[in-house]
Amino acid sequence: MLKKIIYLSLFFVSILNAAVLKTDKDIYSNNQQIVVSFSEMLAEGHDWIGIYPTGSTNEWANQVQWNWTGDKVEGTVTFRPLPEGSYDVRVFYNNSFNMERSKQIRVDANGAVTTVATSKEVYLTEEPIIATFNNMSGDTHDWMAIYPAGSSSDWGNQIDWKWVEADISGQRTFGSLPVGDYEVRVFFHNSFNIEANASFSVEAGTTEVSLALNKEVYAQNELIYIDYTNMQGNESDWIGIYPAGASFNFENVIDFKQTKGNINGQISLGGVDTFPDTENNPGGLAPGNYEVRAFYNNSLGAEVVKSFTVTQQVVNSTLYESADENISENWVHISGPNAPYLHKGMVNLTPTWIDNFTNTSEYRLVFPTPNSTQKVLELDAGGIRWQPHFYIGVILETTNGSRKMIWDPFFNHEETKPFKVNQFLNFPLYVDTQRVSTKKLHVRLDVEKYLRLLEPNNKVISISAFMASGGDLDEIKLSSH
């Protein structure tokens, strides 16, 4: 009698713990999500639900989709659309493969057709692209993208893209595009299988190109900032500086840049010979009259011309270290064997070399206030004795964040090109302050010109400190141009 009571108790416990499984439909289209509701779960351990082809075993390799129940007694789980076929939704307790309950569903191939269309077949270069989609799968990782016509859907070929997220139907707006032929394509489940696509083209806008300069009169060697609007958007559209009145022949171009497919944007020109050949040739535009000219598609027919003038102007400077009778109180000894000290009318910074390979010294001259108007670093170096190798640099704030810029004559020996490592921007120094350190040299560096070599869209906001790893230095200052 006792054994019968135990069996009956186990039977009723089993009945009480039997999972309940429902789906929102019995028959689905192949682009419809599958919503599974569950209740009366044990909620112990890792309960889970899997979808299997009907007739398959519960082995892990046979499941086509699965999800944890979140250790809940009841709730819902949503699965992605499935290909045509017959399936079982199966529930399992505690990360096991012992099926507690199952429900059969069917997926038919006669689902609603996925479509995508643009609001126009032909856009102008200044117009946004509006794309409308219908009958997406509803998966959070459905997405759409614009590709050049005829290109593969490989990642990297897309010009722009957006998540569709869980929207079944809706609209997305993309930015304006250069002249050309394109396709908008939609994809399910973060895949690269095209579900629908639509072709469109972009033609040149009727709005005239315009150029705007940040001023009309510049000082010698100053950068010329040019804002352009309504370019065609060809990769080979370009803007150049000519002497005023010169013919369009390319040999008359003083400096130029391609707009790289952009329709609107900003460039800087006039950084000619940014790396000077001699200490007295700092590079840039000499006094005179000039014209900025914009061209389409690598042509020599100017679309618009803007005039400006460069004049000889007095250089204004802020002197931070003169080393006359003593040195500035603003030196900070970061590392190195000696603190900065006065020696024969110059401040001495002592390098520390390890195995003739690494200089670990660092000294900083912190400016009383960050300088936001003077962006040309000048100093005298050497002339007293032979000095081991050292670098010079500045610490600055830019529109893209903090930067440290370093000029190193060692890069000249190795023919090293400018390079960036995190916030450090590294450049060769055009005068060899080490090999000819017994000769007094003047160094002049236009910080903003060098910054825009590695970061063409960046600008100097302010310069807060000078830094170096050695040298006999004097007349450290920032100048206006």
Image (cartoon, helix red, strand yellow):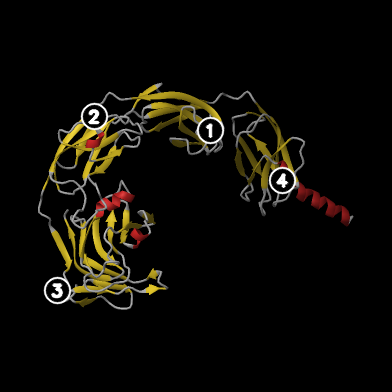
CA distance separating discs 4 and 1: 27 Å
Q: Position of residue 48 (x, y in %)?
A: 67, 47
Q: Is residue 231 above or below residue 70?
A: above
Q: Amino acid at mark 3?
A: Asp
| Residue annotated with mark 1 | 187
Give the tally of numbered discs. 4
Mark positioned earlier in the residue sequence (2 or 4): 4
**What number is the disc on residue 60?**
4
Mark positioned earlier in the residue sequence (4 or 1): 4
Instruction: Tell us which disc is closer to us: 1 or 3.
Output: 3
CA distance separating discs 1 and 2: 43 Å
Mark 2 falls on what kind of element?
strand
**What number is the disc on residue 207?**
none
Whether tag 4 and tag 3 are in contact, CB under 8 A, the answer is no
Q: Nearer the viewer, residue 434 or 158?
A: 434
Whether tag 2 and tag 4 are in contact, CB under 8 A, the answer is no
Mark 1 falls on what kind of element?
strand
Mark positioned earlier in the residue sequence (1 or 3): 1
Q: Amino acid at mark 2?
A: Ala
Mark 4 falls on what kind of element?
helix
CA distance separating discs 2 and 4: 67 Å
| Residue annotated with mark 2 | 302
| Residue annotated with mark 3 | 324
Mark positioned earlier in the residue sequence (1 or 2): 1
Measuring 29% from the left and 31% from the top, which residue is drawn there?
A: 231
Instruction: Tell us which disc is closer to us: 1 or 2.
Output: 2
